[in-house]
Image (cartoon, rainbow, N blue to C red):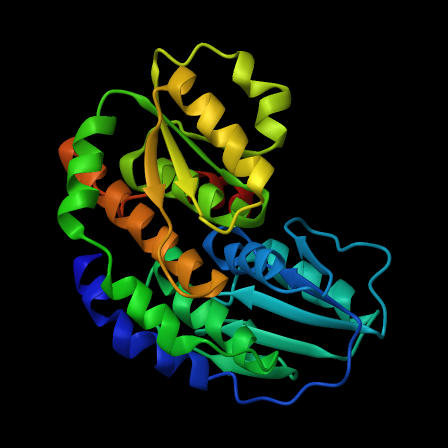
Amino acid sequence: MLELFKKLPQIIPEAYALGDISVKPFKNILVCGMGGSGFPGYLLKDLIDTPVEIAQSYTIPKYVSKDTLAFIISYSGNTEETINMLRRTRKKTKNIVLITSDGKLAKEKEKKVLVPTGMQPRDAIPYLFFPMWFILKQKGIPEVISAVKQINIKEAKSLAAKIKNKIPAVYASYQHKAIAMRWKTQFNEDAKILAISNVYPEMDHNEIESDFKKVFTILLRDQKDHPEIRKEMDLTQRRMHAHNILLKGKSRLAKTFYGIYFGDLTAYYLALLLKKDPYRYEFIEKLKAKLKNG
């Protein structure tokens, strides 16, 4: 994790350049992918105005059509659900881009982005997300690199120590839903603990009634959040004994990746404190094997 983090200023522009692919005009976007390979779709949904749908099953939405641009993402290239979604997508649109490192997807006929092998899918986020950003003619890479360089590793390590032996509950504004989700899934996979994520203002209509004594609450704050959401966070943080993390960066894209990697580092150090191997996935692999063998 640390080696990857240190190389991000080189990895991010390299990943962005891989998206030098032309696509046909489109009215909406479909992103198909599971786990770490599907997560870039949530980032895209948060960051652009074009309608984005994320499919994470064996099927795709019925309204997918010739006006849909589809990104089919599987880092391994062999994910069963994703291959099934590709087959169904072909029947609805020819405007398809595959993003993979190897496997069955790498051998398919559609336009594709081939990314480096040898990584965990969730570590490969720059390679799975930034090619889409290039294809969609989006900018802002220097701002992302600048924001990531502002992350203080010691702060992440200190936060991990505070979370130890508690259930982390991570909240953000609705526009940063994907960042909160990423924190949750990293705590799940790295530290092997249960975690919660939700967004404002929705959480103030249900979760605010919960007992927060056994959880460690984290608020991901953005100074450009809607004024009413900032007010709600101010009013509820005392009840939740919340720890505030300010998302730094000059753009939403930059703030997003600041938040992602601050969370990734925190989860990594929490795993070490709990004496867990952040790259051992015992139950995920057992489930995959059982499904494959029937």
Out of 171 and 268, give the one closest to the viewer: 171
From the viewer's perspective, is residue 47 above or below residue 26?
A: above
Question: How many numbered tags mark residues here?
Answer: 0
Residue found 53% across the figure and 18% down from its top? 208
Report whether residue 118 is seen.
no
Report whether residue 39 is seen.
yes
Out of 75 and 137, give the one closest to the viewer: 137
For the N terminus, the quadrant is bottom left
Residue found 16% across the figure and 41% down from its top? 157
Residue found 41% across the figure and 65% down from its top? 250
For residue 270, what is the image quadrant?
Answer: top left
Residue found 33% across the figure and 41% down from its top? 245
Q: Where is residue 79 in the image (x, y as percent from the top left)?
A: 54, 58
Out of 95 and 224, give the one closest to the viewer: 224
Left or right of 220 on screen, residue 230 = right
Q: Position of residue 264 (x, y in %)?
A: 31, 49
Q: Position of residue 253 (x, y in %)?
A: 47, 64
From the viewer's perspective, is residue 30 above or below residue 169?
A: below
For residue 160, what is the image quadrant?
Answer: top left
For the C terminus, the quadrant is top right
Left or right of 255 on screen, residue 294 = right
Q: Position of residue 5 (x, y in %)?
A: 23, 62
From the viewer's perspective, is residue 240 above or below residue 219?
A: above
For residue 90, what is the image quadrant?
Answer: bottom right
Out of 130 and 141, give the one closest to the viewer: 141
